[in-house]
Amino acid sequence: MDATVQTIEAMERPPVTMASRLEGELLEVSMGPQHPSTHGVFRMNVALEGEIVRKLKPVFGYLHRNHEQIGEHTSYLGSMPYTDRLDYFCSMSNNWAYALSVEKLAGIEVPERAEYLRVILAELTRLQNHASLLGFLLSDMGAWGTPLMYAFREREKILDLFESLAGSRMMCDYMRFGGCRLDASEEWLARAKQIVDRFPEFLDEFEELILGNEIVIGRTQNVGKLSAELAISAGITGPMLRASGVNYDVRKVDGYGFYPRFKFRIPLGNHGDTYDRLMMRALEMRESVGILKQAFAQIQPGPIVNPKVKVRAFRPPAGEAYGRIEAPKGELGFYLISDGGPNPYRYRVRPPSFINLTVLEDLCLGHTVADVMVILGSVDIVMGEVDR
Amino acid sequence: MIGTGILKGMAVTARNFVGSYFDKERLITIQYPEERNPLPENYRNFPFLIYDGDDPHAGLRCVACKICEKECPPQCIYIVKSDDKKPDYMGKPQFYPKVFDIDISVCMSCQICVEVCPFEAIKMDKEFELSKRERFDALLSRKEELSKSNDYYHKIHPLEDAAAVAEAKKKAAAEAAAKAAAAKAAATKPPPVGDAASVPGKPTPSSQQ
């Protein structure tokens, strides 16, 4: 056994009694990091009694890239492409969160059109993230391929939009301090509007495909229940928190960007189980479509970048700032301390999927091994963000 | 009744499967090496250096100011400044890069070098089939491979080129109108610097500072 990795062996174990002898020993299974359902290089040390999970210890760090330290050694602008690589499904949201915190730090105003573009891109990101999450979750449940491919078909259209606007499908690197890098043409907006208008068709089809399916209901309802108290005390955010019935959405609480200008509702769950978390994504996508339609109606031509912001030798004044947004996975925040130099003195990321992962053991205890994959899928993690 | 949900889902699958034979929208894949989707205008891959005219050395716009080397987040650019000077396209003597290497195994295609360049000398390429049979030096692009002509840049950015041409035409028309209005000033007015084909298109707004 590798001495550097802490295993279940090293955790406290119950004393061996006659009763425990009769029950048999716990079987330690290492799931991952190459397991196809762990969404990346993530490993779980699971102690099993028969098929029931009795202990679960997540092991991560396989994808650690020293993101925060790199951020402290690169210029403020130079960190922007690195934020794409945090949650590589939602690079637009990551860009926005980082740009928001630097704008707070330096007191930069953002032009109106740029704010609208940011809302449009962040909501498109939410659509493609949630769509692919549903596909992955179903493939974790054994619905191999088909739902995932349907979800990826829709995701592909949105990624094509990103590619034609920002130049890259996933590593967009699109936002800048005080605006956005390139302007969206009228054709681009028309194409995006057309894709968004047709998105509910996909949602209808997808809901027909899976959400009434008896196997899906049997596999998800009452599995991995998360109580509202535990969710709040563990700092869970995003759809996972709202599935437990807590009405907390940074878009409503902070009202950053132009979100106060849009009418949208926050879907809330009742039971906090995996089915609620799954439905939460489907309902949020419908709300996102509503926001996008309003944004397409309201966006006006204008400048997209604040001309006062310097590209070369950008130095914000000394101070600190915390900017946060409602990323598709939860509250994504960047905490920056500036000492007036060209790079931040301290650069800290509050990653939603890492913090949402902390309750994994509480969700999985008492369930079978097969349920662990479903619960992990519903937490919605991306290892690029968990390990950074 | 139990099982109806599954049957409904199967109907969706069947509709998609049969539909893929008739509906173009349901058949979304293409056979890649034979069929290709056109690349979007803004697509970016790896940087290259622009030269004007026909001679890669004489027309190279880069003056080895090393701003891109300094700003590159993964530090993939390596520049050695020349000892002597060569005339640039305006005839002004400038330094030039003796060595300009980009390690494309390190480059992350972020486009920051393009944004910070004050001379519009470095731009993003669209070539993406770059697999090499060698592991080491092959992925280090030298100055000679990186230098590409301005015509090539315009070829891979057709929309930007058209917009620049339209803008130059508009500008020329406005200038002609102004000339007609002030006929006596027309004789002393210099022609606009460079025509549409020799200036790179409209720079990004952020790169103007």
Image (spheres, coloured by chain):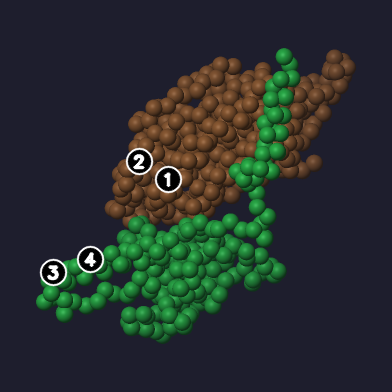
Chain colours: A brown, B green
For label 2, the residue is A299
Residue A130: which quarter of the image?
top right
Give the image location of residue B12, x and y in percent.
67, 31
For label 3, the residue is B181
Give the image location of residue A297, x and y in percent.
37, 37
Dot 1, crowdedness within 10 Å: few (<14), some or many (≥20)? some
User: What whole-number distance in Å separates the C-alpha atoms at marks 1 and 2?
Assistant: 10 Å
Write down the chain letter for disc 3.
Answer: B
- Please indicate, yes or no, whether residue A82 appears anywhere in the rendered image: no
> From the image, which quarter does the N terminus of chain B lie in?
top right
Query: Residue, x 35% and y 71% (percent of image)?
Result: B196
User: What whole-number distance in Å separates the C-alpha atoms at marks 3 and 1?
Assistant: 40 Å
Outermost residue toward the front?
Answer: B22
For label 1, the residue is A189
**As rendered, which of A75 and B141 lies closer to the eye?**
B141
Write down the chain letter for disc 4.
Answer: B
**As rendered, which of A163 and A187 lies closer to the eye?**
A187
Dot 2, crowdedness within 10 Å: few (<14), some or many (≥20)? some
Task: Select label 2 or label 4 by which is in front.
Answer: 4
Do residues under tags 3 and 2 come within 8 Å of each other at their CB atoms? no
> From the image, which quarter does the C terminus of chain B lie in?
bottom left
